[in-house]
Amino acid sequence: MLKGVLGLLLLRLLAMREDYGYSLVLRLQEHGFAELSEGTVYPALTRLESQGLLEARLVRSTSGPARKYYRPTDAGFAELTRAGRAWRDLSAAVARVVDDHEPTTELATEPATEPATEPATEPATERTPS
Amino acid sequence: MTQQSTGETTAEVGLTIDGRGDVALLLAIALAVVLVAVAVVLLAARRRQPREGSLGDRLRLDLAVLRYDAWLDLRGGVGRRRRRELREELRANLADASAQVGSREAVRRLGPLRTLAAESAGGGRPVGRPAWTHGALVAGYAFCGVLIVELLAVMWWTGAAHDSGAPTVRGSLTLFPGSAVEYSRAPGGMSLEFQPGWLVLAAAVVAFAVASRPWLLARRTAPRERATP
């Protein structure tokens, strides 16, 4: 499921401020995605860029190689709005199912309503003594 | 030092060396070439990663980037410019990660570099076409590289043969199957005949096969074959 929402997370973080790969990994980890590794985030960034949702620019660094900073394009912002709405809908639907059906320790003794059975298609035959 | 054909077999190369000074000169030149190559690699690594980190750290990161690039190349479908961009981006990210968690951990967190390359290239089946020209170029490098190493080995062998004092010494190079070397004393110098064997050619063929990626040809035709009833 995380893979499905990773694009949304990245777009959201980059909408807040442009950033580069490793820094985004750290920001995601600070937000609770501790298990998220660089090997997952970097290809996701590349994918979003290939889809035209992100644009990038190189920024020289005094302490190492030039960093590639990403920010959402117009299409990226539109995708962020759409994906954000979809996520909220999904989250609300999941919450309804989880919250409205609190698990109980007792097993239900009676089965749920039986599905309506179709009447027998064959007419009942009367048994006649032979 | 002069070079001449023996005239007996076209595959053979006769090499007449006028004295041990030439052997030393050849060795010195070869050593200088190797040293310059190592210096260039180290300087390039230092230029790319000028900040803290030992030589081992820089080499580990460079090796990871090279492996990533190799998988991108082998997979195909990624242009040279795009590959360079991906390579440089990974290098910058690795440099930052290495400064925080160390080079070993930084590389470990990337996961399998083959997977990373495949996903960075867009996932799915490899695309692209075989790169015959690139394959030929790499094959040429492999051919020359192996031949240079073999020539260095011949120089060492010649030194030993010369020191033995025997008028004629025949032998082969252990690590180069099919090779043959014959040393003879000649008036005022020595004569050396050398056959490189098949390893040089084999290295070139393997390099061509790997670098040109002929399997992409089969993968490009596979979907069409399946589509036809």
Image (cartoon, coloured by chain):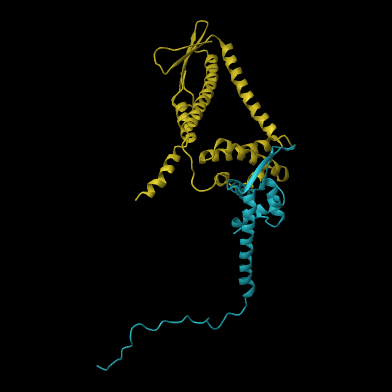
Chain colours: A cyan, B yellow
Which residue is painted at 63% across and 71% down in the image?
A96
Residue A124 image point, x, y percent: 33, 88
Which residue is painted at 50% across and 48% down in the image?
B124
- Where B61 falls versus B185 (above or below)? below
Q: Is residue A121 left or right of residue B58?
A: left
The image shows a total of numbered marks equal to: 0
Pick whichever, B43 or A101, lies toward us: A101
| Corner quadrant of residue B68 | top right
| Corner quadrant of residue A60 | top right
Please, which residue is most extreme toward the left here? Answer: A130
Residue B105 image point, x, y percent: 67, 46
Pick whichever, A116 or B208, lies toward us: A116
Residue B194 image point, x, y percent: 46, 18
- Where A22 falls versus A66 (above or below)? below
Q: Is residue B206 left or right of residue A55?
A: left
- Where B141 falls versus B81 (above or below)? above
Please, which residue is most extreme toward the top here? Answer: B187
Q: Is residue B208 left or right of residue B111?
A: left
Q: Quadrant of the N terminus of chain B?
A: top right
Residue A100 image point, x, y percent: 63, 75
Pick whichever, B205 or B118, lies toward us: B118
Which residue is painted at 51% across and 40% down in the image?
B77
Please, which residue is most extreme toward the bottom here? Answer: A129
